[in-house]
Image: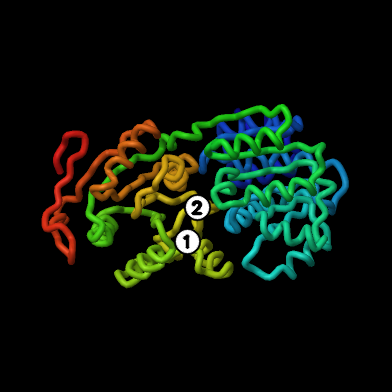
Amino acid sequence: MSFREFNFTQGIMAQIEAMEYKEPTPIQEKAIPLVLEGRDVMGLAQTGTGKTAAFVLPILQRLLDGNRGYIRALIIVPTRELAEQINTAIKVFAKNLQLRSLAVYGGVSSYQQIAALKKGVDILVACPGRLLDHLEQRYVDLSDVETLVLDEADHMFDMGFLPDLRRILRYVPVNRQTLMFSATMPSDIQRLARDVLKNPITIEVDHTVPLDSISHVVFPVEQHLKTLLLLEILKSTPAQSILIFTRTKQRAKILGQKLQRSGYKAISLQGNLSQHQRQSALEGFRKGQYQIMVATDIAARGIDVSQISHVINFDIPATTEAYTHRIGRTGRATRKGEAFTFMTRDERGIVHTLERNVGAELKCRVLQGFDYNAVAKAAPSRVSYTWNSRRY
């Protein structure tokens, strides 16, 4: 199928071709016609499937008719990084359309946001907290909203934004088009979907299964040897760009510093950074200034770097959903990717669960030449692993 079959205006098609989009992804092929028709959509798709373009492109097409300078499309997202990512995509696709977009979020001064809002905005991309601030101070008027998008709805729930979302909905017209996108469908999201969507069409695109372009490997290792194993893996792994996940922001910071001291171009992305520092880190990683980024789950949401070759779970994710979100950062845009997961002895049950739920084999591997029997204070003197009745 070709993008031309959607009958986008020439201004939009010019940008699609300039970005060398060859053919729509499954989520785009299914969602774009429905959004163009004005239907409500519940999209279940994981990261890396092209869902941003699936709603941005048809929204731009629909906004070409009607008044300018009023907020007619509202996109609500959980993180600042995702807000910037979507706003950047809008600006690229709308380059020839004379439509204005703006991203609003906390952690930065509101003055520039207010000045831009006063000039008139057609599409607003917002995080819930800052959007509520602008609404309560009457800098934002949502009475003209025709299309509402709730992106990464499950993450907004995880971050405690559900009450804020329900407050925001009071400011939005009842007669509107609503699009909701989520990688998972917990009960709270199901209830929200029933409340905000009208006769929706549900689209599912492998939302619980990792992308086929990703291979999965588990490295058994004791906790005190993780950093040493990581350094050995990095030495022997030809990689273009590596994203490493840790459980806490403190560990992300410390690991990033250790990698820097080991001679790697590394940076950490975690909640203690200012918005300017976060943006600088993301831009540096995106442009190749840093080869390695160490991040927490919350901080990493919104990272859109298509050339990531490896995702390394330094700390194992606790759920299947977290695993699929993490590894979905690699194997994008028709590229191949690898996902490495470090597993301690007491985490074998989690790995068994992940393997069963994602429907993909997590191959166990040991690194030849690495001293798995190295000791540290209070560490076991000998390490042995059993995986599916195989000894390593």
Residue at mark 1 to residue at mark 2: CA–CA distance:
8 Å
Q: Quadrant of the C terminus?
A: top left
For label 2, the residue is: 305
Instruction: Give the image quarter of residue 29.
Output: top right
Q: Are marks 1 and 2 in contact (CB under 8 Å)?
A: yes
- Dot 1 amino acid type: Phe
For label 1, the residue is: 285
Q: Quadrant of the N terminus?
A: top right
Can residue 335 be seen? Answer: no
Can residue 219 be seen? Answer: yes
Residue at position x 43%, y 37% in the image = 210
Residue at position x 16%, y 55% in the image = 372
Check the image and report above or below for 202 versus 222: above
Residue 362 in the image, given as x and y percentages of width and height: 30, 38
Residue 70 in the image, given as x and y percentages of width and height: 84, 52
Residue 16 in the image, given as x and y percentages of width and height: 64, 43
